[in-house]
Amino acid sequence: MGEGRFAGKVAVVTGAANGIGAATVCRFLDEGARVAAIDREAEGLAALLAGRPPGGLLTMAGDCTDAAVLAAFHSQVIAAFGAVDILFNNVGQSGRERAAEFHESTEDVWRFVLEVSLLTTMRMTRLVAPAMRGRGGRIINMSSDAAFVGDARLADYAAAKMGIVGFTRAVARELAPHGVTVNAVAPGAVRTRAHDQLSPDVVARIRDATPAGFIAEPEDVAGCVAFLASDDARYITGQTLLIDGGRWMN
Ligand SMILES: NC(=O)c1ccc[n+]([C@@H]2O[C@H](COP(=O)([O-])OP(=O)(O)OC[C@H]3O[C@@H](n4cnc5c(N)ncnc54)[C@H](O)[C@@H]3O)[C@@H](O)[C@H]2O)c1
């Protein structure tokens, strides 16, 4: 068994092959957890395994929007590691190249964005919550400061990511008596693959709107997720932590 803050703990990360998910997998492993990682990209998952001692990381390639895939993943985790202590519901995305101003948007894109950014979180939480009620745990959900700021062309994404905030609060209230905390993180601009696709002028505009004056690294989010997953955060629940260099302050 590893040493560190999460020694003996089992952590699950969705959307784990790249960006914030991958950074968080590494953080949990480095701090002693056994980690189960799911992503639809098998290559990225294989890269996470490279150079790691066997046994600490379980990976599964699959689409998180498929309820049957998530259920099979959960069963594999239980069989390999036992009950889940920490769940990081990270998977999600905007419509990206299909994003549009709302008056020109289409329902198929809304459904895609809500499915991948909100329903995945609800389904995975539904899978782990019964056992967590008996033994405690930590759930961290991925929101976005785009929901707070109200970024143009992202109304569907803002709806999904604000949906995460309400879901987090309601489930936090239900699970708090059972020793389970449920919180959300809401990053601003983070240097990931999705972010790399933005044009330089858009990146400059975001940086100018960020008091801290720089774009975050995935590790900046992973560290906050690890804190919320740790014993130090046992009295924090139902909260949404903005990690955005001050772009949104209320
Ligand atoms: N990067 C940012 O600036 C930023 C800001 C706020 C919130 N977020 C949120 O952080 C989360 C992670 O984003 P990221 O920036 O690290 O993106 P990323 O593209 O680097 O990584 C996302 C991962 O999710 C996987 N994925 C996407 N859809 C999937 C599906 N249906 N099934 C399985 N895997 C799937 C991708 O293969 C990829 O590995 C998302 O929920 C995103 O909305 C990102």
Image (cartoon, helix red, strand yellow):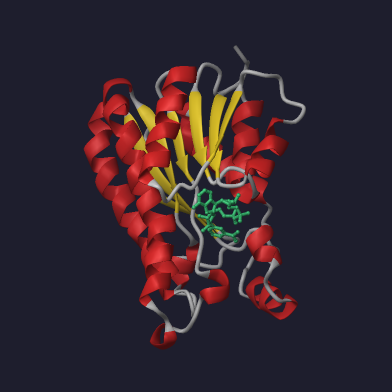
Q: Position of residue 45 (x, y in %)?
A: 64, 38
The one of 182 and 155 positioned closer to us in this rendering: 155
How many discs appear? 0
Q: Position of residue 80 (x, y in %)?
A: 49, 19
At x 30%, y 33%, the residue is: 129
The one of 61 and 189 positioned closer to us in this rendering: 61
Residue 149 in view (yes/no):
yes
Name the image quarter holding the C terminus: bottom left
Quarter of the view holding residue 28: top right
Q: Is residue 55 above or below residue 196?
A: above
At x 35%, y 53%, the residue is: 119
Task: Work out which residue is located at the far right of the displayed protein and give it.
Answer: 51
At x 36%, y 75%, the residue is: 107
Name the image quarter holding the N terminus: top right
Task: Work out which residue is located at the far bottom of the displayed protein and give it.
Answer: 103
Q: Is residue 97 above or below residue 245?
A: below
Quarter of the view holding residue 127: top left
Quarter of the view holding residue 206: bottom right
Q: Is residue 87 above or below residue 241?
A: above
Q: Position of residue 188 (x, y in %)?
A: 56, 62
Quarter, ligand 1? bottom right
Q: Position of residue 224 (x, y in %)?
A: 55, 43
At x 64%, y 48%, the residue is: 18
Residue 238 in view (yes/no):
no
Task: Work out which residue is located at the far top of the displayed protein and give it.
Answer: 1
Residue 54 vs residue 77: left or right? Answer: right
